[in-house]
Amino acid sequence: MFQSQERKEQRRGFWVVLLTLSIIPLLMVLGNSMLIPVLPEIRSELNISQLQVSLLITLFSIPAGVVIPISGVLSDRFGRKKVIIPSLLLYGAGGMLAGFASTAGSYMTMLAGRILQGIGAAGTAPIAMALVSDLYRGEKRSKALGILEASNGMGKVLSPIFGALLALIAWYAVYFAFPILILPAAFALWIFVKEPERTGQIPPIAQYGRHLKKTWKRQGKWLLAAFLAGAVTLFILFGVLFHLSDILEAKYRIDGILKGLILAVPLLAMSSTSYWTGGHIRQKTRRMRLFIGGGLFAIALALAVIPFFTNTYVLLGLLVLIGIGSGLVLPSLNTLITSAVGSEERGIVTSLYGSVRFLGVAIGPPVFGALESHRFLLFLTASGLAALSGVLALKTIRQTGLLRGKGGQTRVLLRKKGLQPT
């Protein structure tokens, strides 16, 4: 009886912690996705070009991508929560600055607010992913990471709808939503999530370089393929969403809540698939390898077909296929990268992975915006890039048993030494 009650308490604690942590990627994703349905209106209100409006996405994502490794090193040295909470507050403050700049019609100050938000975002979801990996092992870890990716996807689903709803109040209202949402999330993280105690001395900065060099020498090929897969998936996802947002308004005269709902459909497919994937990979590299390769090939197929159709329903169906493919790829990469490196390297490796994801998001909108008049070139090139990433992932990610082995050694090292994984 007492054991049953204890198990219930443990399960309840698991879900409280996971719910709190899953709010973080959801909020981070609002930083870009909530703006997507409002971008055409921002362009019109400020009388700026398509390239200039795309910089509101790019100048959020590039600073985030650059700062993430620094946040990872700081979180390894001083603790995950000590990085996440100040980062959340900076993220909210940047949103407030961009909001006030919008009311004054100052495009450059709005960009400054977006840069601040990007720097803040660097210390949120990527560090939360590392914290989940510190807290859980085995199936619990893959399940937890799948839920975090599903939360990330759910943020992408809800954010176009939220953005469209807030735009009914004012086009700049989206910026003021950030500080309102951030404060309770930071408080919940402070109260409910207890970080594992750190043992030993804080390593010198030079040690991170040695750990990274050792990891790259041992596992560089498949890590490079995995990083490329993550960057390409998000480059395509955000590029396609940016393109869709523009054509829905310019070509089909669809705006407001209906536009937000249409943008949410492929993202709902991604979020649902992410949740399913997290529950089915169970630390098995064969499944992850197949999900990553299969997801990228599904994305490549959809992109190759898109330029041949103009029907709205066919286009939406193909975008759903891109969402499903993304939902197969991203949770598998999360578990693979966080589980196949040792605890000493995990913070810096997951941070670098977060960086390339953000850089993919940063590049997508301006590239798709610049090539919007060359549909065949744009979509067929993107299709080839997705297919190439899928081939590299299948070729470099090895089929072995469990990802972790005895003594905390990595799967690849175990294989080289001829040991049996546990």
Image: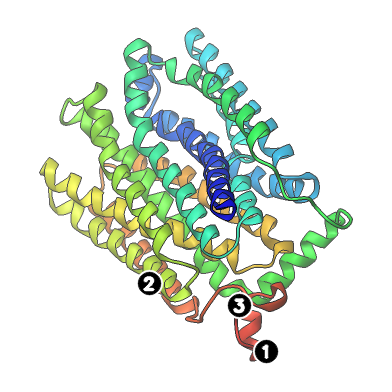
Residue at the spot of label 2: 290
Q: Nearer the viewer, residue 57 or 412?
A: 412
Q: Is residue 385 above or below residue 358?
A: below
At 43% from the left and 69% from the top, the residue drawn is 288
Q: Nearer the viewer, residue 380 or 26?
A: 26
**What secondary structure is found at the residue carrying circle 1?**
helix
Which amino acid type corresponds to the residue marked 2 in the rendered image? Leu
Q: Nearer the viewer, residue 13 or 170?
A: 13
Q: Residue furthest bottom?
A: 418
Residue at the spot of label 3: 411
Q: Whole-percent x and y of residue 101?
A: 54, 14
Q: Is residue 363 above or below residue 213?
A: above
**What secondary structure is found at the residue carrying circle 3?**
helix
Whole-number angstrom distance, CA of label 3 to CA of label 1: 10 Å
* Drawn side of residue 85 relative to residue 249, left or right: right
**What secondary structure is found at the residue carrying circle 2?**
helix
Whole-number angstrom distance, CA of label 2 to CA of label 1: 25 Å
* Drawn side of residue 109 relative to residue 342, left or right: left
Residue at the spot of label 1: 417
At 19% from the left and 26% from the top, the residue drawn is 254
Would you say the residues marked 3 and 2 are in contact, meaning their CB atoms lie under 8 Å apart? no
Q: Which mark is residue 63?
A: none
Which amino acid type corresponds to the residue marked 1 in the rendered image? Lys
Q: Whole-percent x and y of residue 75?
A: 73, 46
Q: Whole-percent x and y of residue 76?
A: 75, 51
Q: Whole-percent x and y of residue 37?
A: 33, 28
Q: In the rendered image, which quarter is residue 341 located in?
A: bottom right
At 54% from the left and 76% from the top, the residue drawn is 402
* Disc 2 packing (10 Å; few <14; some 14–19; many ≥20): some
Which amino acid type corresponds to the residue marked 3 in the rendered image? Arg
